[in-house]
Amino acid sequence: MKESISHCFETLKEKSPLVQSITNFVVMNNTANALLSLGASPIMAHAKSEVLDMVGIVNALVINIGTLDEYWVESMLLAAQRANDLGKPWVLDPVGAGATPYRNETIGKLLALKPSVIRGNASEILSLAQVNIKSRGVDSIHDSGEAVQAAINLSKEVGCIVCVSGAKDFIVGGERVVSLDNGHPMMAKVTGMGCTASAIVGAFSGVEKDLFLATTAAMAVLGVAGEIAAEKSDGPGTLQLHLYDTLYNLTSGELMKRMKVEF
Ligand SMILES: Nc1ncnc2c1ncn2[C@@H]1O[C@H](COP(=O)(O)OP(=O)(O)OP(=O)(O)O)[C@@H](O)[C@H]1O
Ligand SMILES: Cc1ncsc1CCO
Ligand SMILES: [Mg+2]
């Protein structure tokens, strides 16, 4: 698996996938910069007048409901349907799932369109799997390990790959589960680190057809880059900056050496 992940990483650098994000106002800049540093090419586009054409030219689509509103939700549904029609992968980041009825209703509509990959924190994945939980905004109040069974159920129900992020990241494809033990607690103190994770999952999905592998590779790269960056940082501000530099300079050798992956 480590070799396949490393190969995926090389392919991404070589192909520089174009990734469309319909994402939230908070993280547009962070995620675009992270994708560029990694070697992918970001485009943020949500106008209903262009969304169908845009999905036509990109390698993957990421839909993140962080700062959703009525207009944006219509764009998201149009874009997801278009990606399905064209057989292109799309990633759902269900930010703040469970926090309000409007978020839940929107997530229901997006789930009906069957995302290729769902990436969320533990509280969000528990909420999507309809485990009756309380959620408190965008930050998880559960450990990722608590949401693994929910992720398995969700993966089977929707027929997609599910990633639960947190101290450990779990990637689930039906009965297959992989865990990654990289990263650093300070990563949770930079806004939109999870949104960046989802964007990177989009980038890998744009170059690797095996979406279980693509998702695992994406989370391994962010985990490894995050922990290297954290070692050089005094706090979340410099972590954000060091993350770009680390993504830019990361080699497949360093990735292989640092990656802690378990079945
Ligand atoms: N305690 C931790 N230890 C190691 N890595 C962590 C920890 N918490 C988060 N991470 C890493 O941070 C990244 C983002 O995951 P997180 O679960 O915090 O996303 P999120 O809650 O959706 O974030 P946001 O909503 O701010 O975008 C992942 O790569 C994850 O592995
Ligand atoms: C803080 C915040 N609020 C809506 S989206 C977002 C970014 C982290 O998910
Ligand atoms: Mg999130």
Image (cartoon, rainbow, N blue to C red):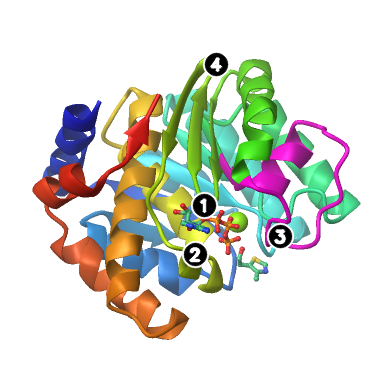
Q: Is residue 243 visible?
A: no
Q: Is residue 218 visible?
A: yes
- In the rendered structure, which amino acid carries the disc numbered 3? Leu
Q: Circle 3 sits on which residue? A: 68
Q: Quadrant of residue 250?
A: bottom left
Q: Which residues are magenta?
A: 119-143
Q: Circle 1 sits on which residue? A: 167
Mark in front: 3 vs 1: 1
Ligand 1 neighbours mark 2 (CB distance < 8 Å) = yes
Q: Quadrant of residue 30?
A: bottom left
Labels 3 and 1: the sequence-earlier one: 3
Residue at image x 76%, y 63%? 137
- Asked if 206 appears above or below 113 in the picture, the reply is below
- In the rendered structure, which amino acid carries the disc numbered 1? Ala
Ligand 1 neighbours mark 1 (CB distance < 8 Å) = yes
Q: Which mark is residue 174?
A: 4
